[in-house]
Image: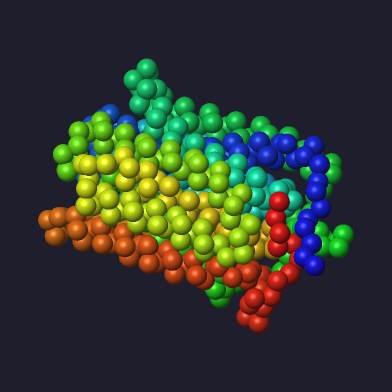
Amino acid sequence: MPLTPPRQKMAGRIGALLGILLMALSLRAAVVSVPPLLGSIGPELGFDSFSTGLLAMLAPIVFAAFGLLTPRLIRWWGLEKILITAVLLAITGQLLRAAVGDVASFLLLSVITLAGYGMGNVVLPPLVKKYFPDRLAIVTSGYVTMLAVGTWMSPQFSVPLANATNWRSSIAAWALLSAIVLVPWTIQIFKDRKHPRPDTPLVNGMVAAPPAKINPWRSPVAWGLAIFLAGNSAQTYVYFTWLPPYLASQGLDTMTAGSMLALFAILGLPVSLLVPLWVPRLRNPIIAVLVFTSFWITGHLGLYLSPTQGTAIWVVFAGLGQGTFAIALLMMNLRSRTTYGSGVLSGFSQGLGYAGAAIVPMLFGMVKDATGGWSASFAMLGICIAVMLTGAVMINGPRKIEDGPDDAGVRRPLERVG
């Protein structure tokens, strides 16, 4: 009979919980706080179309690079040291780029900032698995919700902050949110030194040692999750990049088009709360994937066929489709047995997934310019759906990243989560 990890007292893990939630809240600040301010930043620093496009591509590219690098760093340094390093990089990059006077320096410091957040993306799932193996569902629900709140909060308040001060103060202010992350983790690390905890779950009262090496390049689970994440993220990046320009081109005013993007972003909240509590109860997670995929498809078709009639309804459907992203984050723990395995799966899937997604928003615009219309570009979203579903099929079974080629379909202990 499968075992569940023994319930542990929350006392002694409060610092880790606060640190995970605050880190999740700050992860998207550097990505989504700058675009609303480009009207002020661009003329002062000299941004042109090329450099603006390059800035838009930096996040997925840097996330991809550090997604692949971070698992090796985790093996050398450990999760907590990597997280502290990530936060320090993010703080440094955000503060320094607020003081520069040219585009090249701004882009370089943006890379440093995004490198920190890229490492943070990777370490969050294994940190949840390490500190809360008995409460994976509820803690994952909390941190994915904080990701959604941060995605909405940064663009919502960046412009008012800039109006009250200036754009430099506005983008530097988000470094304070990152700095706060250091407080609970400093407390937690101090506690862990006094009372060390195992990096992996307990099986029959004994620590299950992680495998000496996991090769994600030969793992169907890792490839499946990477493909799934690529198809999902490509659609999300297209919406964040192109939804306002597309709606404006169809006759909506700029303010309404911007409001539709805010609506799309905030709808990540309800699905972030629901998915981690629902999906672990399903024997076949692809059922949930199909539900949220139907939302994506309805939103895509509605916006293409009737962009100015019922616009908010179509955006709501597409926004609810973001549940597939919450599923991807949850699967990093459901498809691994150990903290180390979760880190490897997180890094590999996010690395290749973001790399695959990075090019799609650029192609979306290039195809539109080449064809003179939006039909072929929207057809690309259909390809993204097919890619995402292909990955969903590959991760639907009970196989874990630690499993060898002969282990497919074998159910082992610790597969139920709280």
Judged from this view, the residue extending furthest toward the top is 164
Q: Is residue 307 left or right of residue 33?
A: left
From the viewer's perspective, is residue 1 above or below residue 10? below
Q: Is residue 111 left or right of residue 203?
A: left
For the N terminus, the quadrant is bottom right
When asked about the image quadrant of residue 25, the answer is top right
Q: Nearer the viewer, residue 259 or 365?
A: 259
From the viewer's perspective, is residue 166 above or below residue 188? above
From the viewer's perspective, is residue 392 above or below residue 252? below
Q: Nearer the viewer, residue 40 or 73?
A: 40
From the viewer's perspective, is residue 417 above or below residue 157? below
Residue at 38% across / 67% down in the picture?
A: 386
Q: Nearer the viewer, residue 88 or 270?
A: 270
How many numbered marks does the figure carry?
0
Judged from this view, the residue extending furthest toward the left is 372
Residue 254 placed where, x, y %? 22, 33
Judged from this view, the residue extending furthest toward the right is 205
Q: Is residue 146 visible?
A: yes
Residue at 82% across / 62% down in the picture?
A: 203
Residue 227 placed where, x, y %? 45, 66
Residue 160 placed where, x, y %? 37, 22
Residue at 28% across / 45% down in the picture?
A: 243
Q: Nearer the viewer, residue 241 or 90?
A: 241
Judged from this view, the residue extending furthest toward the bottom is 406
Residue at 39% across / 33% down in the picture?
A: 155
- Colour setup of the view: rainbow
Q: Is residue 113 visible?
A: no
Residue 288 placed where, x, y %? 51, 58
Q: Is residue 50 left or right of residue 156?
A: left
